Amino acid sequence: MVSPELAIIPRHVAIIMDGNGRWANKRGLPRTIGHSKGVEAVRETVKAAADAGVEYLTLFAFSSENWSRPETEVNDLLGLLRKFIRRDLAELHRENVRIRIIGEREKLRSDILPLLLEAEETTRHNTSLTLVIAFNYGSRDEIVRAAAKLAREVQAGRLSPDDITAQMISGELDTADIPDPDLIIRTSGEERLSNFLLWQAAYSELLFMPDYWPDFDRNLFFDALKVFASRDRRFGGLSSKTAAVGG
Ligand code: IPE
Ligand code: IPE
Ligand code: MG
């Protein structure tokens, strides 16, 4: 199933799916066509990740800043997410995929929130790939919500500020029970995180690929895994090779 050169499989891959608009522009098509082609790339990537043995795949679907796009585009994107969940939920469930949603839920419209909750609920006990959908997600907003929760604990006298640890902050984020991403991929040639998993990315390997998201496929996903396998992760220490030579 997995070739030997992919021996080091990242446990968690997170993807900033970027470039739908430019993919469409290049072809003289409306941006919305780029977004619908992007959904096909999502389907293929989910399958590839499951086949590779990746445990967690996080996809940045809609950022808390994407509301600033024209209303028609926002509606297209929300419509596509709704359609994806309606159409694909049964198959994802059959394939034993567990769905998790991260992002701010409080103010979400009533035509989207129940669908997201249903997707999580239906697949809660599945044991294959965990597909984390970052929707209405912004990392700073997530950290602010976590800080407010801890502040309320302090205010209630249940917690001393001196006892706050990095682990406690991690534990209040939307990703509380999800390991940090080992690999973060961004397509479209842009080289920035755009408010995605800032806390969790502390030691993630970053990979910026030139391809627009609608062109992303199984082969590109496996290419990314190969690059990851060749990286030397140090976590502030010494590389295993250096440590072996230096004693
Ligand atoms: C990614 O493609 C989709 C979302 C951000 C929701 P874009 O729509 O950002 O495409 P570009 O960056 O304009 O090409
Ligand atoms: C990041 O892409 C958000 C998603 C992929 C959902 P953007 O296209 O919104 O990011 P910027 O604006 O180029 O930084
Ligand atoms: Mg973009």
Image: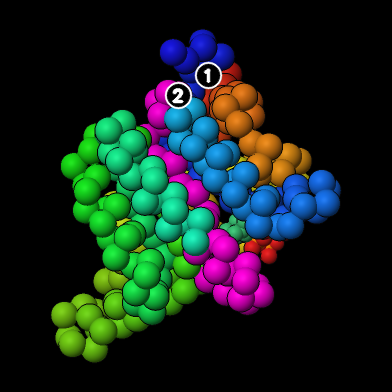
Crowding at mark 1 (Cα within 10 Å: few <14, some 14-19, many 20+):
some
The image shows residue 79 at horizontal and vertical percentages of 49, 61
Residues drawn in magenta: 50-78
> For numbered disc 2, what is the local secondary structure?
helix
The image shows residue 38 at horizontal and vertical percentages of 60, 46
In the rendered structure, which disc, 1 or 2, sits on the residue that comes first in sequence? Answer: 1
Q: On the image, which quarter does residue 93 sit in?
A: top left
Position of residue 226 in the picture relative to residue 176 (left or right): right
Q: On the image, which quarter does residue 155 sit in?
A: bottom left
Query: Is residue 183 shown to the viewer in this render?
Result: no
Q: Which residue is mark 2?
A: 52
The response on whether ligand 2 sits within 8 Å of label 1 is no
Check whether the beta carbons of the residues at disc 1 and disc 2 lie within 8 A of each other.
yes
Q: Residue at 28% x, 60% y: name it.
A: 117
- The image's mark for residue 175 is none
User: Does 206 sit above or below residue 107?
Assistant: above
Position of residue 109 in the picture relative to residue 202 (left or right): left
Nearer to us of marks 1 and 2 is 2
Query: Is residue 55 shown to the viewer in this render?
Result: yes
In the rendered structure, which amino acid carries the disc numbered 1?
A: Leu
Q: Which residue is mark 1?
A: 6
User: Does 7 sit above or below residue 223?
Assistant: above
The tally of labels here is 2
